[in-house]
Amino acid sequence: VFGEIYGALNKMDAEICHSDKVQQDTERIRREWIANITHDLKTPLSPIKGYAELLMDSLTLDSETIQEYGGIILKNVNHTEKMINDLKLTYQLDSGAVPYHPQTVRLVRFLKELVIDIVNDPAFANCSIEFESNIQECEVCLDIDLFRRAVNNLIINALTHNPPETKVTISID
């Protein structure tokens, strides 16, 4: 009679232990992620500060140099803003407040423009990226920002975490 009860209690204990381990692993990964994002936020702040100091300290810069420095500052501010938005999204998802704003989008055009943006990024100038589509166009309903983030991350991870000679192909079928 007690065998079934012991079996059920042992099963429940194993499930609780597994749940505790998953929770501990999740918390560890979360802490590592926050530490990484803190470090990553410092990276674009260095050139922002450096170029802003150059602009402040020099009275003899020509307008071309000022525009170049301003462009570098703006690029790094945009990068910082993107990381802050990633952090904000993480906390929104964690609290169950998923910011989903669907819109109708022409998918082929949207993805083609996304690939062009990556190709034109100097960080990926030496990378091989190809876009191909077996369909002319189709309209889909999606959250533009979330979808852009997901596809961007996939492409950039493919470029970053593979050997430099790897050709990345984005294909719509």
Image (cartoon, helix red, strand yellow):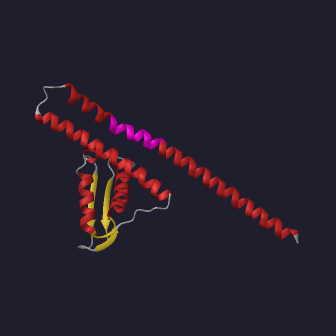
Query: Can residue 61 be seen here?
Result: yes
Magenta residues span: 35-45
Q: Nearer the viewer, residue 100 or 156?
A: 100
Residue 47 shown left or right of residue 27 in the figure:
left
What residue appears at the point 53 percent right and 45 percent down from the top-left corner?
Answer: 31
What residue appears at the point 33 percent right and 51 percent down from the top-left corner?
Answer: 166
How far across and how far down the image is residue 70, in percent?
A: 20, 38
Q: Is residue 95 above or below residue 78?
A: below
Quadrant the N terminus occupies: bottom right
Q: Is residue 38 magenta?
A: yes
Residue 157 shown left or right of residue 20 in the figure:
left
Magenta stretch, overall SS: helix
Q: Nearer the viewer, residue 102 or 147?
A: 102
What residue appears at the point 52 percent right and 48 percent down from the top-left corner?
Answer: 30
Q: How many numbered circles does the render carry?
A: 0
How far across and how far down the image is residue 63, in percent?
A: 11, 35
Query: Can residue 160 be seen here?
Result: no
Residue 94 shown left or right of residue 46 in the figure:
right
Q: Is residue 141 above or below residue 20?
A: below
Q: Is residue 1 above or below residue 64?
A: below
* Quadrant position of residue 137: bottom left
What residue appears at the point 25 percent right and 52 percent down from the top-left corner?
Answer: 119
How far across and how far down the image is residue 8, in percent?
A: 78, 67
How far across and how far down the image is residue 54, in percent?
A: 22, 28
Q: Is residue 58 magenta?
A: no
In this view, the residue farthest toward the right is 1
